[in-house]
Image: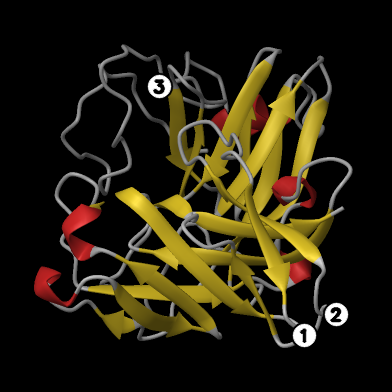
Amino acid sequence: MRPSEGRAATTERSFGEEMRHIAPFAFLVLLAGCGTPPPGTNPTEKDAGTDGSAPMGPGIAGVLKDHADQPIGGGKVLACMATICLFGDAEPDGRFFFPIEPTAEVAVKTLPDPTATPRKSAALCPVRIVDDSLIDVGSLHVPSLPEGALLGPAAADPQTLMAGDGIALTLRVADLTPYLGDTLVDVAARRIPPSQACPWVVPAGEELVAVYTLHPFAAVSASPIAVRAPSDLPAGTKVRFRSISEIDGAFSEPVPGEADGTSVATAPQTGLTELTWLVISKE
């Protein structure tokens, strides 16, 4: 990681708008290699340990990559918990490391960039630190986004929009609130290949059906957002829909759903209330 300094939490954006939704807590930014190193200290050696070996726990390590599986050198990575957020830049080879004391619920993530070409959604991996071990999340992939579907006026609510990769979202624009500073223009979805999703995106004891990243990332809705996604599960198969909190990696309460042979859909009058990563699972 490259040097960074601690700062008070704020609802205003900074560092590419990464500090949203941290207020009203104060937080401390702690990264290996942070700040101005003492004379004679090599920040890279500090990241790897005093003997130049791999980072030691407790904490989280990984490699930041793009959707084409290429390392993203210098990309910003965050490890957010309920009251603090750690942030810094990945090394030139994409490596990152956060020292975090147990126990901790952590959302390891990046920030969306809808102005990039192709558009970028946020990487997201929920991690629980329970002991002094180093948790290696492997490759943290930043998904690309399709063009998406334009939102209509509130007078057209409820609206069913094809967001991408077969995902249909039925929502009310009047009930949708973006992150501070964002604007509501379109909705988009990208299915994440299983090889590019970290192992913890599905709750323990459940089987992953599919996982998607959604845009506008972390927008919230006062009414349920119904979801329909393509699936070849047998008709009648019971499934669950969840979102992953970008604040601390916690799963939302499961929303019941069912397969019809060609798709899976949330039950009538139910749905998600936050657009982050959508996880569809079954027992």
Q: Are the residues flagged by discs 1 and 2 in contact, CB closer than 8 Å?
A: yes
Disc assigned to residue 35? 3
Residue beneath the point at 41% across and 31% down: 3
Disc assigned to residue 261? 1
Query: In terms of sequence position, does the residue under pointer 1 or pointer 2 come before the other?
Result: 2
Whether 191 is drawn above or below 164: the answer is: above
Disc 2 designates what residue? 234
Q: Are the residues flagged by discs 3 and 2 in contact, CB closer than 8 Å?
A: no
Whether 249 is drawn above or below 165: the answer is: above
In this rendered view, identify the residue nearer to me: 146 or 136. Answer: 146
Whether 209 is drawn above or below 61: the answer is: below
SS state under label 2: loop
SS state under label 3: loop
Query: In terms of sequence position, does the residue under pointer 3 or pointer 2 come before the other?
Result: 3
Q: Amino acid at mark 3?
A: Gly
Residue beneath the point at 40% across and 14% down: 28
